[in-house]
Image (spheres, rainbow, N blue to C red):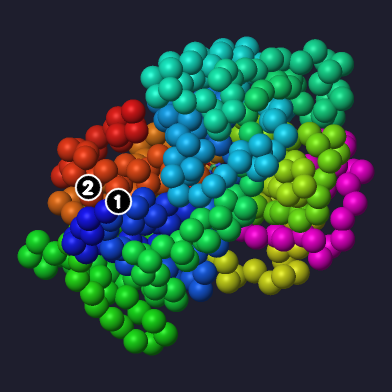
Amino acid sequence: MILKNKRIAILGAGGLGVCAALELAQRGYQVDLFEKHSEPIRKASFVNEGKIHLGFIYALDKDLFTARQMLVGAVHFISNLKRWISIQPEELISTPFNYCNHKGSLADAEELALHYQKCSQIFDEVSKRFGKKYLDLEDKIFSRKLSKSEMEDIVNPEFMEDVFITNEYSVEPRRIASLLREALYQEPKIELHLNSAVQKVERIGTNFRVHYSQSDQVFREDYDEVVNCTWNNLLQIDQTMGIEPLYNWSFRYKFGNKVLVPFQAEDFPSCTMVQGPFGDCVNFKDRGGFFSWYPIGRTGWSEGKNPPEWDKMYSEEERFDIFQRSFEELKQRVPALKGLQFPNEKVDPVGGVIFALGNTDVDNSSSKLHTRHEVGVRSFDGYHSVNTGKYTLIPLLALQVANRIDGKDETNEKTTGIHYHRHLQ
Ligand SMILES: Cc1cc2nc3c(=O)[nH]c(=O)nc-3n(C[C@H](O)[C@H](O)[C@H](O)COP(=O)(O)OP(=O)(O)OC[C@H]3O[C@@H](n4cnc5c(N)ncnc54)[C@H](O)[C@@H]3O)c2cc1C
């Protein structure tokens, strides 16, 4: 392979930064990858729930842009990851999700059924167009509303209106993070700079100067192209380049509690409670369980460009308390959870940042947080800023970034204010 001599800096070794770096290295580029933390993929792409979205949860986005966006990402998720790591989806997936329509939901069963049906239709179109299955496993997606007696086997009917079974899954993100890290450490074309916090980027002629700090020392390096994949720091670094977000935004801190003991598939059902500020439980079988209850676990909210360092703000006791209170709420709704046994040491109550356009919360039906289609790559003559949007979109966007740098994607937006969903189609 010819070594291409463009100098590239990727800012942030999260899921997106690492996948983009691996793809560029495979194409023959030398990449410098800067990470503020002491280890790659330890933030949002590690603590998240791993749901590979089929668009079901975005039922309030009536124009279906978000559902389409997620479906395009979902069919590329495993097949793109296979470019960089050896991965068997059967070994990583959760049990399938039940969509449980909670009392007080922002949508009724009829609206949900119609939305899920539309998602299935879009899936057929997207799957045919790209010649890809969901997670390389499913060539159809489905949902079916359960009868009241079937529903009572899964949830406490005092809290739920209806339940739909689906074939949507999560993949276990910690295992994927570990496989990606191994691939990263073995790739000689990527130079990983850990404990390196990028402060700013400036344009110097046709090049870019990246300023970063290690301990108290500040360093500078020049590059031909820069990709900002810093997620929680995206807006602040973009600002140093004079780039503003499309419109108002919010950063949230949400707990992604993990219980790290093996479960049987039949121990408890994977449930997503919709439509509004509810919660999830995910059964990853031998890879443990994930438990979140939004009203308790969504502890932080910021509309600044640089959100607080939430990861450092909670004591171990406070974290455990957030897990316990969340789990109690879930137990009331999913009775099978009452039978789970695990020692406290096996609970990992970690949290992560969610960046999204929109600054009203999910209990508001017109909140922009119910959409996630104005995401993706914004390119400004060699400086690329990536709003990942969702974990689901990482492998798709990593290829899109590489295509931009490789000159295979002609799109080079210089202005803001366009519908970014077009970039993913
Ligand atoms: C609790 C929770 C549950 C979620 N569930 C789902 C889900 O089920 N499905 C789904 O699709 N999405 C989900 N998400 C969203 C998903 O996790 C994110 O969209 C995605 O992981 C973002 O990936 P990323 O690589 O952009 O960011 P990250 O993985 O956070 O990586 C960004 C990296 O940049 C580094 N960085 C930041 N600032 C600097 C700096 N100045 N200099 C150098 N490095 C820096 C960070 O340390 C980090 O390593 C969830 C998120 C959370 C928090």
- The residue located at (24%, 78%) in the rendering is 220
Residue 224: x percent and y percent?
A: 17, 62
Q: Residue furthest bottom?
A: 216
What is the x, y in percent for residue 2?
22, 55
Relative to 139, 255 lies left or right:
right
Q: Foreground mark, 2 or 1?
A: 1
Whether residue 280 is situated above or below residue 45 in the rendered picture: above
Of the pair 220 and 247, the residue shown nearer to us: 220
Left-right relation of 212 to 310: left
Task: Work out which residue is located at the far front of the displayed protein and give it.
Answer: 1
Tell me if 323 is positioned left or right of 254 in this view: right
Q: Are marks 2 and 1 in contact (CB under 8 Å)?
A: yes
Q: What residue is shown with label 1?
A: 27
Identify the residue shown where x is 35% and y is 79%.
Answer: 213
Q: Magenta segment, which residues? A: 328-357
Residue 119 location in percent, x, y?
52, 19
Query: Circle 2 sits on which residue?
Result: 406
Q: What amino acid type is highlighted by mark number 1?
A: Arg
Nearest to N terminus: mark 2 or mark 1: 1
Please, what is the three-letter code of the amino acid marked with disc 2? Asp
Residue 203, placed above or below residue 60: below
Within 10 angstroms of label 2, few (less than 14), some, or many (20 or more) residues? some
Dividing the picture into quadrants, the one containing residue 50 is top right
Q: Quadrant of the C terminus?
A: top left
**Residue 49 inside the magenta-drawn segment:** no
Q: Residue at x 29, y 47 (%)?
A: 402
